[in-house]
Image: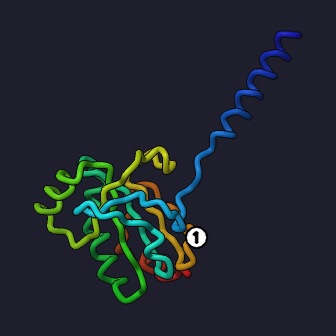
C-alpha cells in the first residue's frame, strides 16, 4: 500500500514538473529577430504589425512542404490586396534555400530561422502560423494544406 502511494506521488510530481517546462507560443510582438533574409539582414515579425501575417515553416527536404508551395504562391496572389504578408522561414542553410529558390523561382519571401524549431514549439513540418493585424495568433495549421482552396481563402480573408 505504501509503495502505491509512493508511485502515485512520483507520477504526480513528474507530471507537474513537465507542465512547468511548457514553451511559449510564437508572438508577432517579438522584439528579437528570429529570422534573417537571404542577404543576412535581420527580419522581425514586429516589422509587420498592422498587417495580417502568414508564417510557413518549411524545409528543402520536406516533401509535404514542397507540395504545398504552388497553393501558397496562388494564395499570396489572390490575397495581394488584402493586407497580407507571407513569410517562409527555414532552418536550412541560406545557400541551400537560395539554391532551392533558384531552381523553383517561387515569388516568396524566404527567410533563415536563427534558432531551432523546437524552441518555437514546432515539431512537424510544414507548420503555419496566421497572425491578426493586432499581432495576436489567429490560427496554427500543422501539416500540408491546399492554401488556394475556396474555404482556406475565405478563412484567411476573415482574419481580423
Q: Which residue is mark 1?
A: 136
User: SS of the residue at dot 1?
Assistant: loop
Q: Residue furthest bottom?
A: 81
Q: Quarter of the image containing the C terminus?
A: bottom right
Viewer-closest of 51 and 125? 51
Which quarter of the picture shows residue 80?
A: bottom left
Q: Position of residue 96 (x, y in %)?
A: 18, 51
Q: Is residue 52 above or below residue 121?
A: below
Q: What residue is drawn where x is 47% and y is 78%? A: 52
Q: What residue is drawn where x is 73% and y is 34%? A: 16
Q: Is residue 112 left or right of residue 55?
A: left
Q: Position of residue 68 (x, y in %)?
A: 30, 62
Q: What residue is drawn where x is 33% and y is 83%? A: 78
Q: Is residue 101 left or right of residue 108?
A: left
Q: Residue furthest right?
A: 1
Viewer-closest of 132 and 148? 132
- Check disc 1: other Cα within 10 Å, few if <14, some if 14-19, many if 20+: some
Q: Position of residue 8 (x, y in %)?
A: 80, 22
Q: Position of residue 88 (x, y in %)?
A: 33, 63
Total numbered badges shown on the rendered structure: 1
Q: Quarter of the image containing the N terminus?
A: top right
Amino acid at each position: 500500500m505504501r509503495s502505491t502511494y509512493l508511485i502515485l506521488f512520483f507520477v504526480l510530481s513528474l507530471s507537474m514538473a513537465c507542465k512547468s517546462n511548457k514553451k511559449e507560443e510564437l508572438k508577432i510582438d517579438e522584439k528579437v529577430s528570429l529570422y534573417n533574409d537571404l542577404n543576412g539582414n535581420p527580419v522581425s515579425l514586429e516589422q509587420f504589425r498592422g498587417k495580417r501575417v502568414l508564417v510557413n515553416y518549411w524545409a528543402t527536404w520536406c516533401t509535404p512542404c514542397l507540395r504545398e508551395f504552388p497553393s501558397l504562391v496562388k494564395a499570396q496572389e489572390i490575397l495581394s490586396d488584402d493586407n497580407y504578408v507571407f513569410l517562409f522561414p527555414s532552418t536550412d542553410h541560406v545557400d541551400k534555400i537560395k539554391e532551392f529558390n533558384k531552381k523553383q523561382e517561387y515569388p516568396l519571401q524566404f527567410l533563415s530561422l536563427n534558432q531551432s524549431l523546437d524552441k518555437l514549439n514546432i515539431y512537424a513540418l510544414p507548420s503555419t502560423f496566421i497572425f491578426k493585424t493586432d499581432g495576436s495568433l489567429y490560427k496554427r495549421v500543422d501539416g500540408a494544406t491546399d492554401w488556394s482552396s475556396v474555404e482556406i481563402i475565405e478563412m484567411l480573408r476573415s482574419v481580423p
